[in-house]
Image (cartoon, grey):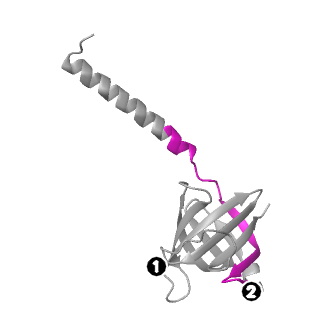
């Protein structure tokens, strides 16, 4: 069967659209987890050493695009974040928008894992030092438990 130029162009266009739809389905299948909620710190590490007890007294509120750490009514840190679902563990990029003097604008690259109401967040300051595990040996590790 011989195709006319318009038929050939239509066939190519339809085939391309079909491939685009299929690839988008695969991308959408890699959705990020819903991590929103209020958490308390179960445990943590900073460069291989246990986190101090003061951090356990804070409340960690995670919205669709921010993490707020507060003690009582006082906000200590407010970070915006973006989850990236291209790999597991999921990647997270954060930037401080409010915090102690000199911290605004600081960035961090991390990884997260969510399972049964527990959120593990491992990160390292800077954008080029994303941790590869949840050991907390080189950066920071927070193990947060969702409040019920």
**Residue at the image position 47 percent from the left and 40 percent from the top:** 24
Vertical side of 1 occupied by 110: above or below: below
Which residue in the structure is indicated by mark 1? 105
Which residue in the structure is indicated by mark 2? 52
The verdict on residue 44 being magenta is yes
Which residue occupies the foreground of this view, 51 or 145?
51
Judged from this view, the residue extending furthest toward the left is 5
Q: Secondary structure at mark 2?
A: loop
Vertical side of 48 occupied by 134: above or below: above
Q: Nearer the viewer, mark 1 or mark 2?
A: 2
The location of residue 102, given as percent across then percent down, is 49, 88
The stretch of residues the image draws in magenta is 25-52
**Residue at the image position 73 percent from the left and 77 percent from the top:** 44
Residue 15's tag is none
Judged from this view, the residue extending furthest toward the bottom is 101
Which residue occupies the foreground of this view, 66 or 3?
3
**Residue at the image position 77 percent from the left and 75 percent from the top:** 43
Instruction: Give the alpha-carbon distance from disc 1 to disc 2, as whole Å.
Output: 24 Å
The location of residue 121, given as percent across then percent down, is 65, 69
Vertical side of 24 occupied by 44: above or below: below
Q: Is residue 57 visible?
A: no
């Amino acid at each position: 069967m011989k195709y006319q130029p318009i038929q050939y162009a239509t066939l190519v266009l339809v085939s391309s659209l079909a491939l685009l739809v299929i690839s988008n389905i695969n991308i959408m299948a890699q959705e990020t987890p819903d991590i929103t909620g209020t958490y308390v710190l179960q445990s943590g590490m900073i460069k291989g050493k246990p986190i101090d007890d003061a951090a356990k007294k804070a409340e960690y509120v995670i919205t669709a695009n921010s993490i707020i750490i507060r003690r009582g009514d006082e906000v200590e840190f407010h970070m915006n974040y973006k989850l990236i679902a291209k790999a597991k563990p999921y990647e997270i990029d954060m930037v401080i928008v409010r915090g102690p003097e000199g911290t605004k604008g600081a960035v961090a690259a991390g990884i997260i894992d969510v399972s049964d109401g527990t959120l593990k967040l491992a990160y390292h300051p800077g954008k080029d030092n994303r941790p590869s595990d949840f050991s907390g040996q080189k950066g920071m590790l927070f193990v947060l438990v969702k409040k019920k």
